[in-house]
Image (cartoon, rainbow, N blue to C red):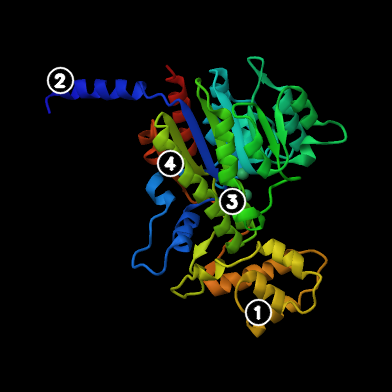
Amino acid sequence: MKPIATLLLAVLCQSALANTAPQNIIMVVGDGMGPSFTTAYRMYADDPSTAEVEETVFDRLLVGMASTHPDMETGYITDSAASATALSTGVKTYNGAIGVDANKQPVQTVLELAKMQGRKTGIAVTSQINHATPASFGAHNESRQNYDKIADGYFDVKINGQFVLDVMLGGGWQYFIRDDRNLVEQFKAAGYEYVDDITQLDTVKAGTPLLGLFADKGMPWALDSANHMRLPALTKAAIRQLENDQGYFLLIEASQVDWAGHGNDIGSSMAEMHDLAVALEWLEQYLVKNPDTLLVVTADHSTGGLSIGANDNYSWSPKWLKNLKASPVEIATQLMTIKNRGALASDLMGFELTTEEVSSLNVIESDEPRPLHNAISKILDNRSNTGWTTTGHTGVDVPIFAKGVGSERFRGHMDNTRIAQTMFELLRNKK
Ligand code: MG
Ligand code: ZN
């Protein structure tokens, strides 16, 4: 190509990029969802009666990989706060930081910029709404542990005289309805609709500010929720409240993929992934009808060192995870008060336990469910041949998924801070 033509092409490409301006941005975080989770989910969702392993929504949307390490004084392994702050502000920080840099100074988040521009903003998560990931988009605090202060900030901090968040959906009664302060009553007095049951979401008038709290802390596990689908319900409801002529920014989080990973619980891991996958399938269709929207999906880190295959055996059998009638945590709780646990365990786990498996449950004496939860997860690990290397986080790169206006800018490898920087650029292109 002639130099002049190359130059012209470069100018044309640049102006095309400069004009990229999504009306709405939907950011989705699968907390703890490293690549082994999306791969395992493909096998879990596979139809074993067909020759191919069917592609998932994750496969269709994949565009790149992100590094996740926090500020180098912290090291290579991030927590959810530092990584969410990187994803919301474009700045590296220390583990535990909520929307502040390494010097504990507040940094503007993409959600806050969207609000300053006159867009509506929201969070829809399966943890408490003041947990590390959503807090890092809508608040600033030197520590993720300051739950009450973060909740207070959602009411007390204003941007251009307005609340930071128009829509807040998830758990958190214990932080919002306290002896010293009732933030639910304050939000209601300020004009917010309030619902405390997920089935009430349909009754809320579209477009109104909305606070929906559905649990004391995190919401029940997907496996313990009615029809197992809570993130799709939260996603649809949030968008219904946020849609408007000025556009919106919505942060969605499948918070409990991480919690299942910390618990080395492959049953709940796959159910949480399914909850997220169904929400993403709905969003995929939403983008067909709303092509002016950008969808960006990623994880903050991976959790548990999930291994598809273990113990030198070349096999993985997700079929043992598919008939769980409750989460392993809930099954453990139900088994605690029973002496001979075989019948109920077989019923709730969805297959006939062997004599050895039953005795591995019957020998446990404990006042709390954790040892039984571990034993149930061990049975599922052995049946499926799943491995774990840690109950903490790992430093592996995480996948990036994107679709819609500007999605091509998330291709290839990038640091997680670049994801936020790109969203800032796209927001600033607002016409
Ligand atoms: Mg999180
Ligand atoms: Zn975690």
Residue under circle 4? 285
Horizontally, residue 62 falls left or right of residue 219, namely left
- Ligand 1 within 8 angstroms of badge 3 C-beta: no
Residue under circle 2? 4
Residue under circle 3? 229
- Ligand 1 within 8 angstroms of badge 2 C-beta: no
Relative depth, front residue between 281 and 368: 281
Identity, as a three-letter code, of the amino acid under mark 4: Gln
Say which quarter of the image contains residue 236.
top right
Marks 1 and 4, how far apart at CA: 43 Å
Residue 357: x %, y % from top left: 65, 79
Horizontally, residue 262 falls left or right of residue 64, namely right
Q: Are marks 1 and 3 in contact (CB under 8 Å)?
A: no
Element assignment for label 3: loop
Relative depth, front residue between 418 and 28: 28
Q: Earlier in the sequence, mark 1 or mark 4?
A: 4
Q: Earlier in the sequence, mark 1 or mark 3?
A: 3
How crowded pointer 1 is (Cα within 10 Å; few <14, some 14-19, many 20+) is rated as some
Residue under circle 1? 357
Element assignment for label 2: helix
View quadrant of ligand 1: top right
